Structures are given as structure tokens and as C-alpha cells.
């Protein structure tokens, strides 16, 4: 089991997360919820690294994503892209959610990270073409 935990710490992309989940299922049968939660957190860390997120915190129903870089004038467009539950500041994104234990909320948070990555890539591409 220790070898599996060590491998989990070395996961650096989403395909590795899915591969590990499949391996665990093949070797041990149904994956316990606590292990699925750990895989979810690892996936969030992978996405956060890609999106240059410095930290992710929660207090009550609010989740705060602190960004490494300023979004500047792109804040309104990013807010529109991310949806009605999201408020975008210069270096923070605040998300109003009920609970992280809810499966729908988990998939919403993954979706927000994916949108943030896509948005960042589009901004970066636009800046390189100027």
C-alpha cells in the first residue's frame, strides 16, 4: 500500500489519475470513497498546476482560487466564461458552492479549472500573436 501512496505523489497529469483509478479497481475491486476523494484532490492539483493556481481554499460555501498571475482587464470575460456562481477579481476567483462533498459540486469545480486553463491558453495565444 505504501508503494501505491508513493506513486500517487508522483502523478503529474490527468491520464495518470485515471490510469491509477483503473489499476486500483482492477487489483482491489470497487475503489473506496476515501480513495476516490484522494484521486479527486490529486486531479485538482494537476489542473491547478496547469492553470497556475497558487492556492485553493474554502470557507463555508465559498471557495477561493488564488492565481499566480493577474487577470487584469480580462476579469469580466473570465467571469462570463466561468458562470454565475463565480466572481473574478484581479488575482482571485471566488466560487459560491454548497458543499465539496456533493458529486455535482466536484464536477463543477473540475469544469471551472478546465475553463480557466482554456481561457489562460487563449489569452496567452492572443498575446503571442500581437
Image: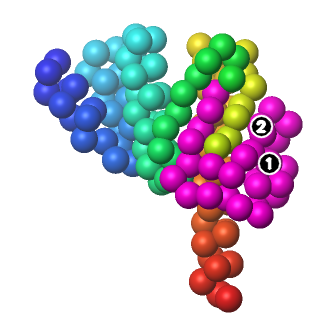
Secondary-structure class at tag 1: helix
Q: Which residues are magenta?
A: 63-91
First in residue order: circle 2 vs circle 1: 1
Left or right of 113 in this view: 46: left
In this view, 35 is above or below 129: above
Residue 55 appears at what percent x and percent y?
49, 38
Q: Residues within 10 Å of mark 1 (few under 14, many from 20)?
A: some
Secondary-structure class at tag 2: strand
Q: Say whether residue 119 is visible.
A: yes
Q: Residues within 10 Å of mark 2 (few under 14, many from 20)?
A: many
User: Is 76 colored magenta in this rendering?
Assistant: yes
**Quadrant of res 93:** top right
Q: Tell me how far mark 2 sits from mark 1, CA to CA.
A: 6 Å
Residue 29 appears at what percent x and percent y?
34, 14
Q: Is the C-beta separation of discs 2 and 1 under 8 Å? A: yes
**Quadrant of res 92:** top right
Residue that carries the numbered disc 1 in the rendered image: 79
Q: Which mark is residue 86?
A: 2
- Residue located 45% across and 11% down the image: 33
Left or right of 76 in this view: 89: left
Name the foreground residue: 89 vs 120.
89
Residue 121 appears at what percent x and percent y?
60, 66
Left or right of 42 in this view: 74: right
Residue 86 appears at what percent x and percent y?
77, 37
Left or right of 42 in this view: 63: right
- Residue located 26% across and 21% down the image: 27
Amino acid at each position: 500500500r505504501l508503494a501505491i501512496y508513493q506513486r500517487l505523489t508522483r502523478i503529474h497529469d490527468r491520464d495518470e489519475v485515471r490510469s491509477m483509478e483503473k489499476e486500483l479497481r482492477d487489483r482491489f475491486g470497487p475503489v473506496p470513497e476515501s480513495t476516490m476523494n484522494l484521486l479527486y484532490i490529486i486531479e485538482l492539483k494537476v489542473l491547478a498546476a496547469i492553470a497556475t493556481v497558487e492556492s485553493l481554499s474554502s470557507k463555508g460555501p465559498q471557495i477561493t482560487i488564488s492565481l499566480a498571475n493577474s487577470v487584469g482587464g480580462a476579469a469580466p470575460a473570465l467571469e462570463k466564461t466561468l458562470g454565475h456562481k463565480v466572481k473574478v477579481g484581479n488575482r482571485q476567483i471566488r466560487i459560491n458552492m454548497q458543499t465539496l462533498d456533493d458529486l455535482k459540486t466536484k464536477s463543477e469545480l473540475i469544469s471551472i479549472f478546465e475553463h480557466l486553463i482554456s481561457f489562460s491558453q487563449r489569452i496567452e495565444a492572443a498575446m503571442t500573436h500581437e
